[in-house]
Amino acid sequence: MTAQLVRAMYKTGVYLAELIESQEDQQRALVKIVAVLKHPTQGDLHQPKMTDVPLFHERKALAQFEKAWVPLSSMKGYEGEVVDYKLSLEQAWMKQYNDLAKENSAWAKLSMKKLEEVRKEYNF
């Protein structure tokens, strides 16, 4: 039996994941991360694009094979190409970094700084 692949959102990141368990009564599913489709956004989720906040969060992507509970509403089937985790992480990081580089705001600059810090941990 092949694993069911899904596109799952977790906080501000989007992942390709393997569905492990679904709990309809609690409207959630347990997934195992296979690849990164969109790198998580940096900063305060409650005050988007603001820099004058108590804590400007540095967010790393979920790790390969990490398990996470996601809302069923944030999941949908996936039938695209399966990319290697490390390659997908680098591509998602680069896309977010390049998109931020096009903006000229204090939030974008601080987000880029945070992304540069997490890149050191990613080793690419």
Image (tube, rainbow, N blue to C red):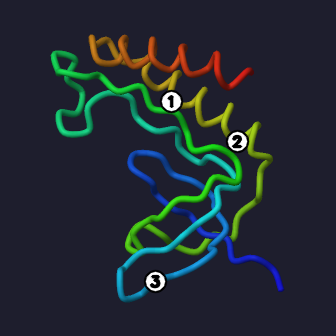
Of 63 and 2, the residue lying toward us = 63
Q: Identify the residue at image location x=62%, y=46%.
A: 36
Q: Contact (CB < 8 A) between labels 2 and 1?
A: no
Task: Name the amino acid, label 2.
Answer: Ser
Q: Residues within 10 Å of mark 2 (few under 14, many from 20)?
A: many
From the image, state whether disc 3 or disc 1 is nearer to you: 3
2 sits left or right of 42 in the view: right
The x, y position of residue 73, in whole percent, is: 38, 73
Q: Which numbered dot is residue 88? A: 2
101 sits left or right of 35 in the view: left
The x, y position of residue 67, in whole percent, is: 59, 58
For residue 58, what is the image quadrant? Answer: top left
Q: Earlier in the sequence, mark 3 or mark 1?
A: 3
Q: Which type of secondary structure does the marked residue at label 1 adopt?
A: helix
**Residue that badge 3 annotates:** 23
Task: Name the amino acid, label 3.
Answer: Gln
> What is the CA distance from the residue labelled 2 to the residue labelled 1?
12 Å
**Residue that badge 1 annotates:** 96
The x, y position of residue 103, in whole percent, is: 35, 18
Q: Compared with residue 13, is residue 107 higher up or lower down, i.e. above or below?
A: above
Q: Identify the residue at image location x=44%, y=65%.
A: 70
119 sits left or right of 109 in the view: right
> In which quadrant will I find the N terminus?
bottom right
For residue 78, what is the image quadrant? Answer: bottom right
Q: Identify the residue at image location x=60%, y=69%.
A: 6
Task: Name the amino acid, label 1.
Answer: Gln
The x, y position of residue 44, in whole percent, is: 26, 31
Q: Earlier in the sequence, mark 2 or mark 1?
A: 2
